[in-house]
Structure formats: structure tokens, C-alpha cells
Image: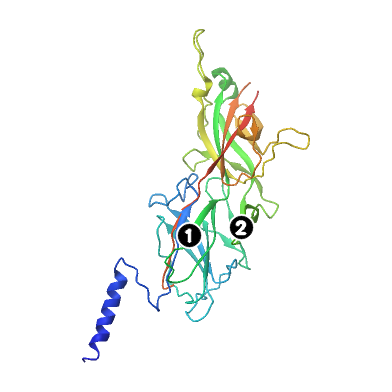
Amino acid sequence: MKKIMPILLCVVLTLSACQSNVLELNDTDRRIYLSVAVESSVQTRTPYTLTTPTPENPVLADVWASTTSNIYKHVDGAAGDGSNNVVSRHTKANFQNGSAQLLIDAIYPQNNTVNFVAMHPQGWVGNDAGISASYTFDGKTDVMFAPQTSGKYGDTNWPKLTFKHLLTWLRIEIVAESEAISDAWGELQSLTIKSSNNVTIDLQSDYRPELVTFGSDGTSIIDMPFYKTGENNVFPDSNTPYTIPAPPPANKDEEIDKMDYVEEVAYVLCEPVTASKVDDEGNNTTEYTLTVQTTERTVEVPVDLMSGENTPYGENTMGKQFTLLLNFKMGNTITVAARTTDWETGGIASGEITE
């Protein structure tokens, strides 16, 4: 019995250490710790604008692991057994903060690097070769991708999944020149934009925007609706047409600035474009075409993106937001943490509506 007691004591101490808040690794652990960040941003009803997830605004993600760089083919049961170099694991994660987070129990190769990619929101579909992933976007969900990061069990510096915005955020403001013009147009019934409805990512460690494609089947151009600002309801909606705001009539000695009556009413997260400052003939180009329907008429509005007043925008719009003013006239454990990268303000856009 005396020979057994030290063994029992050792077991008790090991269990105690595992239950403490202090991480103690030993040769039997297969723990890989990851951290998460967002380049600015909520399984969200609106674009994700935090850099660190919170319990109220988590980042829901698909996380894929593999010991083969850039190949994430999921094989059931191939989670590794600690003695070989095979691991292929697809799981879901709910990131509620930027610190380490436990995923699922799994054993990872002791001497091999494990690679991870992650996609927000959940529901991505991988191809058979495990080298790409696709997702159908809807105009209201912020689609993000965290390119490959790598680590080994026992690493003290956690690899970080950094989520990048893949779509373009268009914010819509509206105003009419006068109440009479607002009455002439009638109530706003719908806003739509033509866009592809899916995004496909090549799972490359060297992430570049050109590795992201949209509507790659060539048949997915659709009229995508706009959504109410701060909500995921279609703007305005079928039962509530929206009155176009306008300044009241002015007295002869009164100056009224119509910009004081501008309202931000809608948003859409849509396919990015590579903007061109001018076309072959030297004219400003239009990057998007909106369809605006009121109770009195339906018009198409060409959108010219600007980086500033009178300065055409000439870059890729991925991860950028633009404000468009429509002016109406007549292991054992795997631990992961995340963040997002900031939405960048791309600028403004002109879109004048005339009778």
C-alpha cells in the first residue's frame, strides 16, 4: 500500500491542476490555443462593427483544422490519434470575446503544426478537394473570413484568427428637395441592387482579395433588397411604404438647409467591385445601379463612388463602407479566440434622382 500512495497522490494533484485557472502542460496534452480578432465588427443583423466579440455580439464561425496547409478536406474520424500526422476537423465556434476559447475535444499530432481557417457566419460549404469554401449571402449578413493561422500543442503564443470583411457596405440616405416633390414621388416602396448571391474563397494562407470570387456559377445575378438601418427587415417593407423626408416651406426671411432633413434609412451588404475613376472616354464610371420604386414611378439610379467630394474612387470596395445620398428631385482541447478588422470608410457616392 505504501508503494501505491504516491501514485494516488500524483493523480489527485494532476486533476487539481487541470481544474485551476493556471495552464500547466505536460507530455500527454494535445492543446492548441488560438485567439480571435475581427478587423471591425454581430452574428449580426447589421454589419459587424466591433473589433473584439462580446457575449451580446458574438462571432459565430465555422472553424476548420488540418495538418496540410491550405487543404481542409473533412474526413470523418480523421482527428488524429497523437501518433500520426493526420487531422481534418470541421467544427463550429461561438466567439464571445477575444481570449482563448475551447472548441471540441480532439487529439492533435504532438510534433506537427495544425492549420486553421474560419468563416463567419456558420453554414459554409467546402468543395470535395478541401481547397475552397462558399456561402450564399443575403444582403443583411456580414460575411467574413479568417485566413490560415497555425500552431502546435503547447504553444505559449496563441495563433490568432483575424476575420476580414468580404462584402461592401452601402448605407442609403434620402431627402427630397421640397414637400411638393416628395408628394409628387409618393411613398418609397422598395430599394434594390443587382448583385451576385454567393461568395467563394480559396483557402490560401496568403490571403488576397483576388482569391475571393462572387457568383462564380455565372447565373446568380439577382435583385438584392436593402434592409432597414439597424434591423434585418427589408426596407421599407410590403406593409409600410416610407414617406420621403423633405424640408418644410420656408418663409421669405428664412433659410432652410435640406441637409438637416436627410435620413439614413437602409443598408445592404453586397458584392464588392473594383472601381475605376474614369472610363475609356475619360468619363466618371458608375459602380452600382440601384432600382428605386415609389408609389408613382420606378427609376434606375447609377451610383458613382467617390472618395471625397469631386474625387472618384478607384480601388476595390471589399471591406469598405459608402454613404449614398439619394436626392429626390422632379485536441484534448482546442482553444480559439477572435477579432475582426475595421470597416474602412471608402467615401460617399452620388445618386441624383430626377423626375
Q: Amino acid at mark 1?
A: Lys
Q: Residues within 10 Å of mark 2 (few under 14, many from 20)?
A: many
Q: Which residue is mark 1?
A: 160
When asked about the image quadrant of residue 181, the answer is top right
The percent position of residue 62, horizontal first and vertical second, equals: 50, 60
Q: Residues within 10 Å of mark 1 (few under 14, many from 20)?
A: many
Look at the image and tell me whether residue 238 can be seen. no
Q: Secondary structure at mark 1?
A: strand
Q: Nearer the viewer, mark 2 or mark 1?
A: 1
Residue 20 sits above or below residue 118 on the image: below
Residue at x-position 45% and y-position 49%: 51
Disc with the residue nearer the chain's start (2 vs 1):
1
The percent position of residue 295, horizontal first and vertical second, equals: 59, 28
The percent position of residue 318, horizontal first and vertical second, equals: 60, 47
Look at the image and tell me whether residue 114 can be seen. yes
The quadrant of the rendering that contains the C terminus is top right
Residue 182 sits above or below residue 218 on the image: above
> Along the horizontal axis of the image, is 323 left or right of 82?
right
Numbered circles on residues, count: 2
The quadrant of the rendering that contains the N terminus is bottom left
Q: Secondary structure at mark 2?
A: strand
Q: Amino acid at mark 2?
A: Ile
| Distance (Cα) linking label 2 and label 1 | 19 Å
Residue at x-position 50% and y-position 24%: 261
Q: Which residue is mark 2?
A: 201
